[in-house]
Every structure is written in C-alpha cells, then in structure tokens.
Image (cartoon, grey):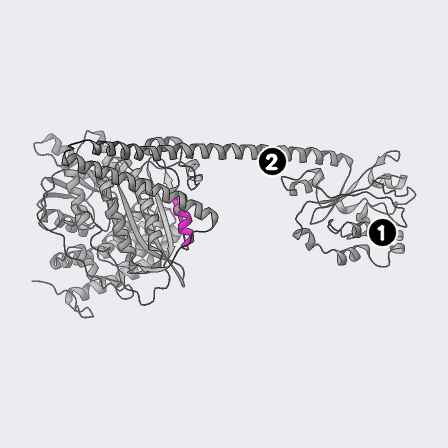
C-alpha cells in the first residue's frame, strides 16, 4: 500500500501535544473490542499524500471504500497533531469533520455488521518541533495510527500497536479455548443425556418384554396375569411420557409449540395432580399436602393441559427427591400490576436440596443437578427445562430456592387472565386430600398420650380440642422448658408420652432448642413441629433440629389428625368423607374477620369458635402492650415471638388484615429493624382493634349479613 507522507517542515511549536490521548490511558480502547476481533478484522488503509492534498485524498479514499465506516475529525489537532492550524484553515472550504459527518453518519457504525474499530495507519518523519511536542527523537520514524472506536478518536503509536497485537492474540486464543471448552461441555452433556435416555428407555422396555414373554407361557395364574398387565401398562405410560418430553423439547427449540387459553379451575387441576401422585408419595411415606394461602379464583384462563404438565413434573420431582417429611403445595394470587393478576403455586419439599452450583444448570435441557442424582433417582433431565419454557409461554416463569440437605422451594407464576365476575374460594375443593385424610372425621380415633407445647391460649384450646375429640389424652404446656422437663420425666415414669406436638416459637425455650435437647437426652418418640413459617428456612430447621414432621399454621384439623395418626402408627377410622366446605368467601368484605372460614377451621364447632374468640379478646390487649414494651427495650427475640403469636392467633380466625400487619411486624423483628417495626406497630394496633370490634359483634350476634353472626350458645 502507498504511504501517506507528512512533511517534516510543519511547525508545531505553538501547539500542545495531541489531546486525543488525554481522556484515556494508552490502549484503553482495547477493552471495548469484541472478544473475537483480530487485527485482520479491523478495517484499515494507507495512502500517499502531501499536506496540500491530504484532505482530498482522504475524502476520495472514503468514497472509494463504501464498506468503511465514516470518520469525524472533531478538531484539527486530533489528526496527528502534525498538521498546522493555518494549513487546515487554508485547505478546507469547510471543516473536514463536518463534511465527512454529513456523508457518513456515525449511526452506520452501529448498524454495520462489523462493529470493530477503524484503524488508519499513517507513517511520518518527525521534525524538531514535532519531536518536542511528541517527546520523540527527530531521527526516529514515527508510525502512529488514528483509531476511531465508535465513541472517540485514539492516537496510538507503534509500541501501543504491538501491545494491541498481543492483547488481540490473547483474546483470540481465549475465545478459541472457550469455544473448545463449550463444545466439550456440550458433548459431555449430550453423552450423559444419551446415557440417561438409554437407561430410561431400556428399563421399561425390559419390563414390557419380560412380562410379555411371561404372559405367553401356558396356564399363567390370574393373579400373576393381572400384575403383569399392570406392569406393562405402567411402563408403557412411562415410555409415552418420555417420548412426549422429547417431542415437546424439539417443538420448543423450533418455536412451534403453541399454547391455548381456556377457562379452567386451578383447584381442580391441582386436585388431579395430588390424586395422581398420592400413591407415589404414600409408597415413600412422604406426606403430600395442599393449601390455599388467601383466596384463589375458581377459574382462570390458561392452558389446562400444559399447566397440569408443569405441576405433575414439579410435584413429582419434589416427591422423588424427598426421603422424609412431606411435600406441600401452596396456592395464592399475587398482583404484579393491578391489571395483571398472577396465579402463584409454591411446591415446598424437605428433600435433598441443591448447591448454588447445581442451581445454575438446573434448567439446562440435557442435565440434572449432577450425574450422581441421575444414577440415584433416575430421570432424563428434560422435565424442568420443558416446564420452565411452558411457564414462560403461559405468561409466567419458574423460580427456585434451595439449600443442600434442607430442601427446595419451586415457585410457578402464571397469568390468570381477566378475573371479572369470577368466584373466589379460600379452601381447596374437596377431593384433593388423600383417601386417608378424606376419611378423617370427628369419629376418627387416636390412641396414646400426647404432649402439646404451645404458648398461645387460643391455639392450646383449638389443637387440644381437635386431638381430644379423636380420643387422645392431651397434656398442654406453654413453653419449651416445661415440655422438655415433662417429657423426660415421663420417660423415667411408667407412662411416657407417645408423641409431642411442638410449637417452634415459644418463650423461655423455643421449639428448636427444646427438640435438640430432647433428642440429645434419648427421646425417641415422634415430635411434630407446629410452625407458621410455611415459606421460610424455619420450616427446614424443624427437621434439622430433630422433628419427624411439621404442620403449618393455621392448623387444618384433617391434616393434623392425619399426621398424628401416621406418626403414632395406630390409625382407626370409621367414617366417610367430611362434607364440602362452604364456597362463598368474599375477600372484599371478610378480611377483618372471616367467621365462616374460622368456623371451618374448628370443624363447625360454634361453641369452640366463640371460646377462641373470647380468648383472643382477652389476650390481645396484653400482646399489644408487650409489643410496645419490647420495642422500647429493643428485645428482638421477644418482639418477634409476640408478633408471631399474634399472627397465628389471628390467622385461626381468618383475620387476613391483622395477619398481614403482624406478619410485617414479625419480619421486621426477625431482621432486627426496630425503626421499621416501630413504624409498623400503629397499623398493627389498628388492625387488631378492628378485629376485636368485629369479634365482639360476632359474639353478641350483631354481625351484618344473613348470618347474623353465630350467637353465643348457652
């Protein structure tokens, strides 16, 4: 290429060194290069020019090279600092930079396929004045380049250019290595996937072929024949599901998977999921529970087939990876915006959990958390990837939090569509419970001595009543220290307690410490944790402390009795399913005190409900005073405990607003944020006072509506 020669007679003695480098260190523009750029990719040219033809030749060069992006010269000194101001003013009819800017706007740099910097190499000899200005000896040939990096000009000499070459070479090598690593990782993932697929296909095929051969034998007994056909059918369904997963993934990758929006019942869908997976959970002795957290619409607009597919996968995984404890499905509605309600389903398990590293690749289509998980539990690693893609197609997503050896929480959010004129309900539809739970009624018999450790008077009355109605002998204490002392004393006597129901938030000694102390002193009988923290790490802490299972507040009688039955291993039931609960919950008018929901919680026992209401009326003023005192004393533990007790008691009565206020206060206390707690206390106090007014109206029979309240039975 020809070389542009700038005459050495140009005098720069009146000029400062080029200012183009003043705003950044040498080579700073290299940080903005794309990782795949090399010097070969950088557009460049050289040309020959004298000072009086410089601008013409440059202009012609740009016009003859339409692929090169334009260059803007912002000031005369930025062209190398080697052209005098007088020459530029004399040679240009208008500023050179303006002319080029008009012909080649900067936006072309952003729209061009190649977005690498423009490099203009220029050779020149340096005169004395230029040498002084540049700090170079006059005998040295100076080879600077002008670089436009898409934002500003850079003046770089040959030494920096060598650095650039080295940096770009390193970047190129790094890119190649990263590409090789990615290719190897992809190959490993595919190889692992093929190995998993081979196992997943061959296992059911072995059963299908083997039992088919058995059926071809003469005189197969009817019992064996039926069992063989059931095995073949089950494994055939497994293969069909496997094929469907592969087809779904291929459709998703190709962008050809479509979803439809139909009116469907989330409660009925979840009931179907629980029913379908109940046998699997029972076989592992893992509890499978479902609850509504607040009111849930009777119908939504979504794709019922795909929604069921997502839930089957997530709940099935939770059961598969849980060895002890239970899996709970919590359903609620959250409002991201006023015009966009979202259905939220939380699947909480107490299984093996995951590390942060495993979470990073959890939703990759050809992998599980790690290879050992596949070997231990089986599976192709497709389900979660497909489920997340489906959730996104339904206007939502799937998120997960997990802790190794403590369990996981998978959260699905989906668009509900319009909810105008839709009925709401506060309890799941009848039928979601297992046959075991559905058969629990007032006639269910529990045998054994039970110790209930609970500091809330209303919860003592409520839970004690549930258990005594089923025939249990119940002893109640109000703190963990009493529970430990009484339980260990019973071991030394002739009639030890058969089981302990342990509230985890109590004064003197909390449930976690009490459970650990009991286990360390040889207590081997079951301990059932009672906790209101259904979505926090405290749930997993219950099992880590030594509890056998946990029940979430507000307490559901059927669930509680079923869990106690299971832990005592002495269930006897002689009744049919309980009647369907009422379905006329209106969240707009019953959020202060939902007496119908509260009545359901006590299984229709109006006298018991009135007694609980009276206890709450008596206890609340003291709790509010305690909250004030603990705030003044900055007693974090006591403040949290009282707020927790207040929340649980209000929740038993369906007092959504008081529950929400107490919950916010408890969270602030747990975080040690006393300023936030102090600002929340007035709202909490107001909600509790409104609740007390509603309770007094209820007890006196003054409640509005056709119910007229539940008059106090004499």
Identity of the residue furthest to the right in this view: 9
- Residue plotted at (9% across, 31% down): 493
- Residue plotted at (11% across, 63% down): 712
392 to 203, vertically: above or below: below
Instruction: Give 572 or 43, whichever is nearer the viewer.
Output: 43
Identify the disc placed on residue 55.
1
Identify the disc placed on residue 175.
2
Which range is magenta? Answer: 387-400
Relative image position of residue 485 (x, y in whole percent): 17, 35
238 to 77, vertically: above or below: above
Q: Mark yes or no: residue 95 visible.
A: yes
The secondary structure type at the circle numbered 2 is helix
Instruction: Give 306 or 657, whichever is nearer the viewer.
Output: 306
Image side of residue 355 versus residue 532, left or right: right
Q: Which callout, 1 or 2, points at the residue further toward the start of the chain?
A: 1
Relative image position of residue 303 (x, y in whole percent): 36, 56
Q: Mark yes or no: residue 552 visible.
A: no
């Amino acid at each position: 290429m020809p070389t542009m020669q700038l005459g050495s007679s140009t005098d720069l003695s009146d000029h400062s060194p080029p200012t183009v480098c003043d705003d950044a260190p040498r080579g700073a523009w290299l940080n903005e290069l794309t990782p795949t750029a090399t010097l070969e990719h950088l557009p460049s040219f050289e040309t020959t020019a004298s000072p009086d033809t410089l601008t013409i030749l440059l202009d012609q060069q740009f016009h003859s090279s339409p692929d090169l992006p334009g260059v803007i010269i912002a000031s005369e000194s930025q062209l190398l600092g080697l052209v005098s101001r007088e020459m530029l003013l004399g040679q240009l009819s208008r500023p050179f930079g303006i002319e080029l800017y008009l012909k080649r706007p900067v936006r072309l740099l952003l729209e061009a396929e190649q977005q690498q910097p423009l490099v203009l190499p220029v050779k020149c000899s340096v005169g004395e004045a230029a040498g002084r200005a540049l700090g170079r000896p006059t005998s040295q040939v100076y080879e600077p380049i002008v670089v436009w990096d898409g934002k500003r000009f850079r003046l770089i000499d040959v030494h920096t250019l060598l650095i650039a070459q080295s940096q770009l070479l390193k970047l190129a090598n790094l890119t190649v290595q990263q590409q090789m690593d990615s290719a190897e990782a992809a190959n490993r993932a595919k190889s692992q996937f093929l190995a998993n697929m081979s196992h997943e296909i061959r296992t059911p095929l072995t059963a299908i072929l083997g039992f088919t051969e058995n059926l071809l034998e003469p005189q197969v007994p009817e019992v064996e024949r039926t069992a063989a056909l059931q095995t073949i059918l089950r494994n055939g369904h497994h293969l069909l599901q496997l094929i469907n997963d592969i087809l779904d993934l291929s459709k998703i990758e190709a962008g050809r998977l479509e979803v439809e929006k139909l009116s469907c019942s989330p409660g009925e869908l979840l009931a179907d999921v629980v029913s379908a997976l109940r046998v699997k959970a029972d076989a592992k002795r893992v509890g499978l529970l479902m609850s509504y957290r607040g009111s849930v619409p009777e119908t939504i607009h979504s794709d019922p087939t795909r929604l069921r597919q997502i839930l089957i996968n997530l709940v099935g995984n939770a059961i598969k990876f849980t060895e002890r404890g239970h899996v709970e499905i919590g359903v609620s509605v959250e409002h991201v915006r006023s015009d966009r309600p979202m259905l939220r389903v939380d699947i909480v398990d107490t299984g093996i959990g995951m590390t942060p590293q495993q979470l990073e690749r959890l939703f990759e289509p050809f992998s599980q958390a790690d290879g050992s998980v596949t070997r231990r539990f089986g599976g192709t690693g497709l389900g979660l990837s497909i489920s997340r893609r489906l959730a996104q197609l339904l206007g939502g997503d799937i998120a997960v939090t997990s802790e190794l050896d403590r369990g996981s929480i998978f959260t699905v959010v989906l668009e509900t569509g319009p909810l105008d004129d839709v009925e709401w309900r506060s309890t799941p539809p009848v039928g979601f419970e297992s046959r075991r739970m559905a058969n629990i009624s007032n006639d269910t018999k529990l045998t054994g001595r039970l110790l209930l450790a609970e500091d809330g008077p209303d919860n003592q009355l409520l839970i004690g009543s549930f258990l005594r109605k089923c025939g249990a002998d119940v002893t109640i204490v109000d703190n963990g220290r009493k529970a430990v002392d009484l339980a260990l004393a019973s071991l030394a006597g002739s009639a030890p307690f058969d089981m302990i129901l342990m509230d985890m938030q109590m004064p003197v000694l909390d449930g976690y410490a009490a459970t650990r102390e009991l286990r360390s002193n040889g207590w081997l009988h079951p301990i059932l944790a009672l906790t209101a923290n259904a979505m926090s790490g405290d749930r997993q802490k219950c099992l880590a402390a030594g509890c056998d299972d946990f029940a979430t507040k507000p307490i559901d009688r059927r669930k509680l009795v079923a869990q106690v039955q299971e832990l005592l291993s002495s269930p006897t039931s002689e009744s049919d399913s309980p009647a369907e609960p009422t379905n006329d919950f209106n969240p707009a008018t019953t959020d202060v005190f939902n007496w119908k929901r509260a009545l359901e919680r006590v299984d229709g026992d109006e006298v018991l409900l009135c007694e609980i209401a009276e206890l709450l009326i008596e206890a609340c003023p003291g709790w509010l005073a305690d909250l004030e005192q603990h705030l003044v004393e900055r007693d974090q533990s006591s403040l949290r405990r009282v707020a927790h007790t207040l929340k649980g008691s209000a929740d038993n009565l369906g007092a959504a607003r008081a529950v929400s206020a107490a919950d916010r206060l408890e969270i602030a206390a747990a975080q040690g944020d006393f300023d936030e707690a102090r600002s929340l206390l007035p709202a909490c106090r107001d909600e509790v006072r409104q609740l007390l007014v509603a309770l007094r109206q209820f007890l006196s029979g003054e409640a509005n509506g056709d119910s007229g309240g539940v008059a106090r039975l004499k």
